[in-house]
Amino acid sequence: MARLALLLPLALLAAGLALARGESRYEKFLRQHVDPSDPSPADPRRYCNDLMRRRDMATDRSCKHLNTFIHSSAEQIATVCGAGGEPAGGDLRLSEDAFPLTLCRLQGGAEPPNCDYGGSDSTQRIIIACVDGEPVHFETQV
């Protein structure tokens, strides 16, 4: 319950920022987590540095500490919200299938505007939050 109390203000802040950008929660999910390109980038570090900047998660003012990109189409990921997933508590769904992923992690000492990321690839099942049949939040990989 304490974890939920800490996460609620962050979720509300994220939702507010998404609305300020003029994007829905689903559109924000797509921007931050979906990249149907090559599931194994040749250079995960370069991939993370480039994509985190292009997707506005590494800016002159802030560096997102951790982000996961799912290398599948939005349609394939959305199946987790239905028959391709199982309930995992609340609005969370656990995928039946594994997805190719790239995890981007901010390197120690990196600060805006010099956000520097390391990257690692894996194939794992994912847990996402769904609202009205659409993915709106990436929780974790398992």
Image: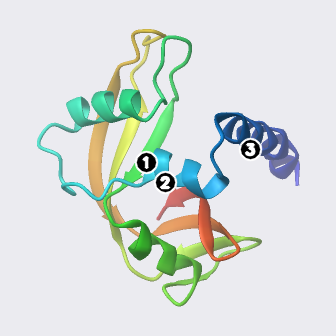
From this view, report whether residue 99 is shown above or below residue 66: below
Q: Which residue is mark 2?
A: 30
- Residue 63 spot, x, y in % from top left: 50, 22
Nearest to N terminus: mark 3 or mark 1: 3
Q: Which residue is mark 1?
A: 68
Task: Sort mark 1 into few (<14), some (14-19) or many (20+) by Cα contacts within 10 Å.
Answer: many
- Residue 134 spot, x, y in % from top left: 60, 70
The residues tagged by marks 2 and 3 sit, at their Cα atoms, a distance apart of 14 Å
Nearest to N terminus: mark 2 or mark 1: 2
The residues tagged by marks 3 and 1 sit, at their Cα atoms, a distance apart of 18 Å
- Residue 21 spot, x, y in % from top left: 64, 35
Disc 2 residue type? Leu
Q: Residue at x 83, y 51 (%)?
A: 4
Q: Element type at marker 1?
A: strand
Disc 3 residue type? Ala
Which is more toward the observer, 40 or 3?
40
Q: Element type at marker 3?
A: helix
Q: Which residue is mark 3?
A: 15
